[in-house]
Amino acid sequence: MCGIIGYIGSKKAQPILLNCLSKLEYRGYDSCGIAVMSSGIEVYKDAVRVKVLSKAAPELDGTIGIGHTRWATHGEPSRQNAHPHCDCTGRIAVVHNGTITNFHKLREQLAAEGHILASQTDTEVLPHLIEKYYDGDFARAVELVLEEVEGAYTMIAMMTGEPRLVAARKDSPLIIGIGDRENYIASDVPALLDYTSRVIYLEDGDIAVVTADDISLKNAGAPITREEHKILWSVEDAQKGGYEHFMLKEIHEQPKVIRDTLAEYLSQYISSAKKAADLTRGGGLEDVLILASGTSYHAGLVGKYIIEGLLKVPVRVELASEYIYSGQASARNKAIVITQSGETLDALKAIKRLKEAGSRVIALTNVVGSTASRVADETVYTRAGPEISVAATKTFIAQLIALYWMAVPYARADVRRPGDLVLELRQLPGKVQQILDNQTVIAEMARQIEKFDHVFYVGRGISYPVALEGALKLKEISYIHAEGYASGELKHGPYALLGSQSPVVAVVTQDNTYEATTTSIKEIKARKSPVLAVVGEGDETMADLADSVVTVPHTDPLFSPVVNVIVLQLLAYYAAKERGCPIDFPRNLAKTLTVE
Amino acid sequence: MKQAVILAAGEGQRLRPFTLNRPKAMLSIADKPILQYIIEALAQNGIRNIVLTVGYRKEQVYDYFGSGERCGVNITYVTQVPQLGTAHALWQARDCVDDEFLVLSGDNLIEAPTIAAFVQVKPSGLLVKRVENPNRYGVVNIEGGEVRDIAEKPAEAKSNLVNTGIYAFTKDVFKFMEDVLDIPDALNNMLAADQPITARETDGTWLDVVYPWDIISLNEAVLKNIGVSLGGTIETGVSLRGNVVVGADSIVRSGSCIYGPVVIGSGCDIGPQVCIMPATSIGDNVTLSPFSEIRNSVIGDDVAIGPGSIVSDSVIDKGCVLKGRFTALGGPSEVRVNGESPTLNVGVIMGEECQVDGNVTAQPGVIIGNYCQVQMMKTLSGRIPDRSLVY
C-alpha cells in the first residue's frame, strides 16, 4: 500500500503536501518524498518518515506539487527507490500507487531507446514513457502511456512549464478534492479533510487533468463528469475503519497478523527457498544473545523461555541501551536483535558492537529494508503491517510468533514433537479471536483498576515477561503507575507497598509454576490487595482465590504469552479509555526512537 | 446513483450456532462473507461510496472490511443499537446520505448483474424477483411498472414477485419513516401519499440464507462461478480437476486429489493424500491431515482435521480441531423447523472452536454448538448446545 497526493493552486505547495502525507502514513511510512514545481521541478525524498522529511527538506518554492508515502513489501526502501520519480531530463515527475506488471519489458525498451533509469522500481518507467510520448500535449502523452502500461497504475504526473496535474486511477483508490481556486488529489479522504470536504471519487480507467480552477475527466477516451460528494466524517474515523482508536483496531488485527506471519514462515519452511532464521543452521549453537528495548525486550524475554525450553541452549536477554556500554560479545554468540522499526538507535549500535566481536546477527524487524536489516547478517521480518498506535500491540505478537518459529520446527526430539507444536501454533488465531469476542469482561475489570494510582503485575516463568509487558502497556497509555514483577520477587521489597489501594494483576499459567504462583497470590491476598487474575480455562482454584478473573482459552503453556498478553493489552486500553487518555498518542512518547 | 447504504446490523438468530460471534452478513460463502459479494457487485456498477449500518458484532465487519481497501471502496460506518428494523437501520444513516442512494440488505447474496439495470432507475424504486414460494417474503403487487402494495408474508400470495430488500431512494424517504420500523411500511406510507415507486424485476442472483444448512447449497451455487487460480505450493503428484482456487502461502502435498469447484484459502497445509471433492470451500490457515476426504462442505478458518476423517455435506466453523478419524457421512436427515420437518441431505453443522477427540461419528443432520468438547469414540446426534462437554 502507498499514499499519493497532489496540490495545485496559489498557496505554497510544500507544507500542504507534507501535512497531507502525514495523514496518509497509515498507508505506509518507510519512505516518502515530494516534488514541487516553480521554474523547474525540485524533488526531495528519502527512506524516512514524513516528520523527518519535513524537518530535513529544504524550502522548495512553487504552488504545484506531488507527494508520496510508501510501505515496501518487495524491494528495500531507499532514497533512490522513493517517489517521486523523474524522467531523463528532470522535467517530468510521477508518484504512483500500484504495481505495473509489464515493467520489465517497458524498461528494456526504454533502455534500448537510450533512457537512463536510475531506480529499481516499476514506477520509473512512467515518467520516461511520458517523456517519450510528449509532443506538446502533456495530457495526451499520459493517455498514450497508460495504453501501454499493464497492471495497477493509480498515479499523478506533473511537468515543467505545464500548469496542471494529470492523474489516473486503476485499481488503487484516488480522489480529487475541490478547493477555492485550488484543487487536491489524494489516495484517500483523510489526507484532505484539513482543506476541503468536497470530493470527486475517480473510477477505474479515469484520467483527470486538474488545474487550479478546472477539473476535466476522461474515461476510455471520452469526456465524462463525475458527481461531487460532500464528506461528513472526521479524519480520525476514516483511517480507523470503524474503531475509536488505532490501538483497538490493531489489537483486533492480531488474529490476522498471526495467520499471515505463520503462513509466510510455513511456506518458506516447506519450500526451503529461504528458511526463516533457523537458529541451528551451521551447527554448534552454543548460546544465544537477544538484545532489544521496550516492548521488543519483553518479546525477547519470552524468546528466552522458548529457545531454552525447546533447543536446550542458554539464552541471555539484555537491554540494547545497556549492552552498548558494558555488554560482552564473542564470535560464539548467535545474536537476535529485535527492533520493530529497524531504526532504533540503541539496537543499531548494539548490532555494530556485535558485528565487531564477530557474532552472527539476526535482525527481527517489521520494516522491510530498514537500517537494521541492512547491517545484520540475516533478517527475519514480522508481517504486522504499519503500526500507528504508539503502544505496540500487533508487532509484539508478530515478534513472538517469529521467535516461536525460530525454535519450534527445530525443537529437540527428546523435548517436544515439532509437528504437535506447529499444529498448536496454528490454532492461536482462533484463540486470540475468542478473547476479542468476549472482551466485555476485560472492560469490566479495567473499570476496577482505573481508579487506583498504582498497580502491580506479577507472573512466573514464561508469564513473567507477560507481566512486564502488561505493566508497560498500562503505564504508557493510562498513566497509571504500574510495575511488573516476577511473582517470587514481590517479597523482596514491594510487599511494603501492598494494601487495599494497590491491586495486583496476576498472570497464572498452568505449568510447573502454578503452585508457587498460587502461594504468592495467597500471600498477596493476606496483605489486602485486590487480585485480578488471568487464568486458563477450567481453573476453579483461582476463580475462588482472586477477586475477579478473566479466563483465556486453553493452549500449551509455551504459547500462553500470546493469549495472556491480549487480555493485558485490552485491560490497558479500557483503563486508559475510562480515564479519558489520548490512547494512540500518549504524552512524551514517540514510536521510533532514533535518539539515545 | 453513486452511493449505497447496506444494512448489516442484523444478528440472524435462526443461523445459530454460526451467528454467536458474527452478524448474518459476515457468514462465509465460498471463502467470502455475504457482505463482500454485495460490496463487489456495487463497485462493479460504479458505486464506491458505501455506508454500512452495523450493530450486532460490528467489530467483525470492521476487522474484515476496514475502510474498504479490500474492495476498492470507501466505507463509512454508522451503528444501529438496538436493531429494531430495517427502517430504523436506514434512519441511523440519514446524516451520511447523498440526495439519491441505493439501499440493500446485507443478508442477501447478489452479483453485479442483479443490480446492473436497477442502478439506473430514478428513485423511488424497488427491485423485485420472481420466486417459487413467495409466502415467506414481502409479496409485491405491481401495476403498470409501479408498486401498488406490499403484503408481508401473506397467507395467500397475489403474485410470485417478492421484495428483494433493494431500493432506490431520495432523501425524501426519511419523511415517510417517522413512525415505522421497517422499510416496507415506509413504502406503504409513500403509496398512501401518492408517491410513485417504480418496480423493476431482476433475474440475477439473489440468494437468501435462513437456516444453517442453507450455507451448504448456497456455497455450491456460488462455487459454480469460480475460476482457476493457484497460489502457494502445489507439490508434484497432486491431481487437480475442474476449477480450483488455492490461496497464497498454502501447500497441497503430494498424492492429494482436488476436484473442483473447490476454493482453498491462504496459509493452508493440506495432505499428503487428501481428497477434496466438488463444492467445497476451505478457509485460511486450515490443516487437513492425510487420508481424509472432504466433500460438498464449508470449512472455516484455522480448522484442523486429523487423519482418516470423512466430512460430507457439512459446515465446520472456524477454529475446530478434529483430532482424527472423524466421520460425518451426510445423508437424508429430518430437521424440525417452524413445525415443518423437511428432509435434507446434511452431514454435520458444527459451531466454532470445538475440540473433537478421535473416532467420533456424527449422524446426519447433527447440530453442534460453539466451544463444544467431544471425547473419543462418541456418536453424536440431535442438537448439542454451546459449550457442551460430550463424554
Image (cartoon, rainbow, N blue to C red):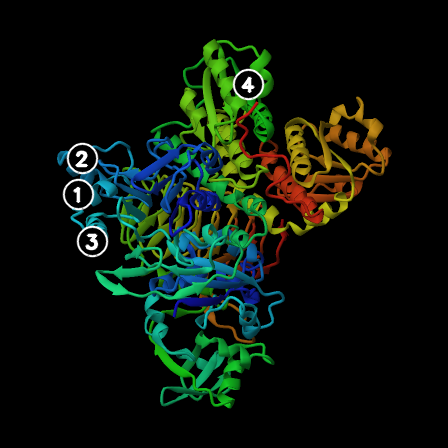
Q: Which residue is mark 3?
A: A140
Q: Residue under label 1, please give it.
A: A132
Q: Which residue is mark 2?
A: A115
Q: In whole angstroms, how far apart are the C-alphas of marks 2 and 4?
A: 57 Å
Residue type, mark 2 in image = His
Q: Residue at x 38, y 56 (%)?
A: A176
For this rendering, which residue is in front, A164 or A22? A164
Counting residues from the start of the chain, the first of labels 2 and 4 encountered is 2
Q: CA distance from mark 1 to mark 3?
A: 12 Å
Q: Callout 3, which amino acid?
A: Arg
Question: Are circles 1 and 2 on residues that touch, CB within 8 Å?
Answer: yes
User: Amino acid type of disc 1?
Assistant: Lys
In the rendered image, the quadrant that contains the N terminus of chain B is bottom left
Give neighbour class at mark 4: few <14, some 14-19, many 20+ (Cα, 10 Å). Answer: some
Residue A354 position, x and y percent, is 49, 14
Q: CA distance from mark 2 to mark 3?
A: 20 Å
Residue at 17% x, 43% y is A132
Same-chain check, marks 2 and 3: yes
Name the N-terminal-most of marks 1 and 2.
2
